[in-house]
Image (cartoon, helix red, strand yellow):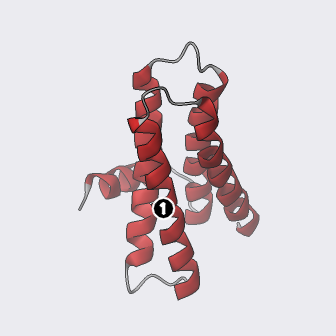
């Protein structure tokens, strides 16, 4: 089992019983971390940004890996959408991490995606 899967499994033991609610809560947490960094950009340390990006990337790695499993019950189209979002998030994360002087606005899309997906998951619970 990968580290991302282990972290997800560990966190889920203390999580709400509904898996959609759990997924929504970790996306909301990741969005909150990124938003705090964006709001306090001048004061934030590079390590805080890297930690938040790593946390977000781990979440999306688990989502993408789970959606790629043949036995996953979601329709193929939704699984493909998850994979496409994950690829976009990985690219944006890399763009932020490799930028010489990253702009805080680069976090906006990551924050928005996490919040929108979380809202949809909360609506389904």
Residue at 64% of width from left, 54% of height from top? 113
Residue at 40% of width from left, 54% of height from top? 8
Residue at 61% of width from left, 42% of height from top? 31
Q: Where is residue 97 in the image (x, y as percent from the top left)?
A: 41, 37
Image quadrant in which the C terminus is located: bottom right
Question: Is 115 placed left or right of 81 in the picture?
Answer: right
Question: Is 119 placed left or right of 43 in the picture?
Answer: right
Q: Name the residue under label 1.
A: 86
Residue 58 visible in the snapshot? yes
Please name whichever residue, 29 or 103, is drawn nearer the observer in this view of the structure.
103
Please name whichever residue, 76 or 1, is drawn nearer the observer in this view of the structure.
76
Q: Where is residue 77 in the image (x, y as percent from the top left)?
A: 57, 84
Residue 75 visible in the snapshot? no
Mark 1 closeness class: few <14, some 14–19, many ≥20 residues within 10 Å: many
Q: Position of residue 87 (x, y in %)?
A: 46, 62
Please name whichever residue, 7 or 77, is drawn nearer the observer in this view of the structure.
77
Question: Is 21 placed left or right of 79 in the picture?
Answer: right
* Helix, strand or loop status at disc 1: helix
Residue at 40% of width from left, 50% of height from top? 58
Q: Which residue lies furthest to the left in this view?
A: 1
Against 1, is 109 above or below?
A: above
Report the number of discs. 1
Q: Where is residue 86 in the image (x, y as percent from the top left)?
A: 48, 62
Against 58, is 106 above or below?
A: above
Image quadrant in which the N terminus is located: bottom left
Q: Residue furthest right?
A: 123
Against 121, is 79 above or below?
A: below
Q: In which quarter of the image is residue 100?
A: top left
């Amino acid at each position: 089992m990968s580290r991302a899967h282990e972290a997800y499994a560990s966190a889920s033991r203390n999580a709400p019983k509904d898996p959609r609610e759990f997924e929504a809560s970790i996306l909301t947490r990741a969005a909150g971390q990124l938003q705090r960094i964006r709001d306090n950009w001048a004061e934030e340390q590079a390590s805080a940004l890297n930690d938040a990006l790593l946390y977000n990337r781990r979440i999306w790695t688990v989502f993408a890996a789970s959606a790629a499993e043949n036995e996953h019950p979601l329709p193929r189209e939704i699984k493909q959408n998850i994979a496409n979002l994950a690829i976009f998030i990985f690219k944006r994360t890399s763009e932020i991490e490799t930028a010489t002087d990253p702009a805080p606005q680069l976090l906006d899309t990551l924050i928005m995606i996490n919040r929108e997906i979380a809202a949809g998951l909360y609506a389904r619970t």
